[in-house]
Amino acid sequence: MTQPTVSTRTEFYRLHNGQKVPLPFADQEYENRLMGLRTIMDRTGVQAVVLTSMHNIAYYSGFLYCSFGRPYGLVVTATESVTISAGIDAGQPWRRCYGDNITYTDWGRNNFWRAVRSVTGTGRVIGVEGDHMTMAARMLVDEFLSPSQVIDIAPDTMRQRMHKSPAELDLIRAGANVADVGGYAIRDAVAVGAREIDVAMAGRDAMELEIARRFPDAEYRDTWVWFQSGLNTDGAHNPVTARALEHGDILSLNTFPMISGYYTALERTMFVGEVDQASLDIWQANIGAHELGMSLLKPGATCAEVTHKINDFFAERDLLQYRSFGYGHSFGVLSHYYGREAGLELREDIDTVLEPGMVISMEPMLTIPAGQAGAGGYREHDILIITEDGAENITGYPYGPDFNVIG
């Protein structure tokens, strides 16, 4: 179908503008993923899946949408895979997705759901993402699709995403390499008087240039750095500020390259000029936990078991009360504002067994409150791929005081 004239006032149409472009992965990779989703559908009795999250749409189609308050979707049936996108994006979603695309217009409220219905039909068993779909959207499913039953398939899709393909592992390895590039650029930019924002920009620019060099056919978006100093290191996700670095400051280096929706990270504790003994003691204890944790990541271990052993390490040193979150998480299609594989996190309440092909970080953090000796946030972060007999560490940037006391 060609682009309609204004007078037709169509609810949706197909705008196949230009030619398909290279996606992050080969067609067979997306076929394999869709086969996995259809296996889930067969097992659960779902006849049509309506995916709405950025991470699942990107995982199964390659298309990473930009919402700006508009709904986007991917409808998968036994024979079709169709992204549903807003007219404001024109032909880009079709060029950047595996499968078909339907564009909906904003000439009538809920045209998105009319476009979805054109693929799903009505009266069928519909799969949705219960952890993403809003209450308002759930009501519209009933209104427009009249489903015989609605089934939450989010947990099953999460489990599928936790097991990485060889192609995904290659991309994640490349991402870890890019994170290291950002780390070295940050190290070079650290100096007394430099602002957090200045150092962060150096790391971000270096990573974006490296991503463009490695992936010339990609879209470039969302790569970022959190570089924190002094008191601002107390939280892992504290935004960058314009604070100027001072001699003796504790620093937290955090680089996050984003490649076609895939997140990787490097995180390191650093100091400007020198590190006092109290801070060094805390830093070395956290490094000890980091090294212990990495040694525990192997097939057959559970997330909870690893967590408890690191807890014991900190408790023996009277430091457990300063731990602020879990010790690691999965990687893949996720970012700081979309995606989560909550079933693969190093926490006490997660019993997932580590298996070959999973990717997980080790990132212990201790936060010592202001006013105490060694005050600040200490964190090291490496990414490991679980193998048949252990784990492959794909992070290369060094940790510890020998390399990370700068100036």
Image (tube, helix red, strand yellow):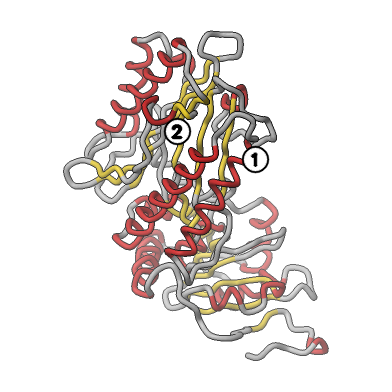
Residue at the (54%, 20%) spot, across then down: 248
For this rendering, which residue is in front, 283 or 41? 283
Residue at the (57%, 27%) spot, across then down: 233
Q: Residue 276 appears at what percent x and percent y?
A: 48, 13
In screen coordinates, is 224 left or right of 90? left
For this rendering, which residue is in front, 189 or 49? 189
Q: Quadrant of residue 295?
A: top left
Quarter placement of the N terminus: bottom right
Q: Secondary structure at mark 2?
A: strand
The crowd level at tag 1 (other Cα within 10 Å; few <14, some 14-19, many 20+) is some
For this rendering, which residue is in front, 290 or 389? 290
| Amino acid under disc 2 | Arg
Return the disc, 1 or 2, that comes first in the chain's sequence: 1
Q: Which residue is mark 1?
A: 197
Residue 39 higher or lower than 191, as above or below = below
For this rendering, which residue is in front, 364 or 346? 364
Residue at the (46%, 10%) spot, across then down: 278
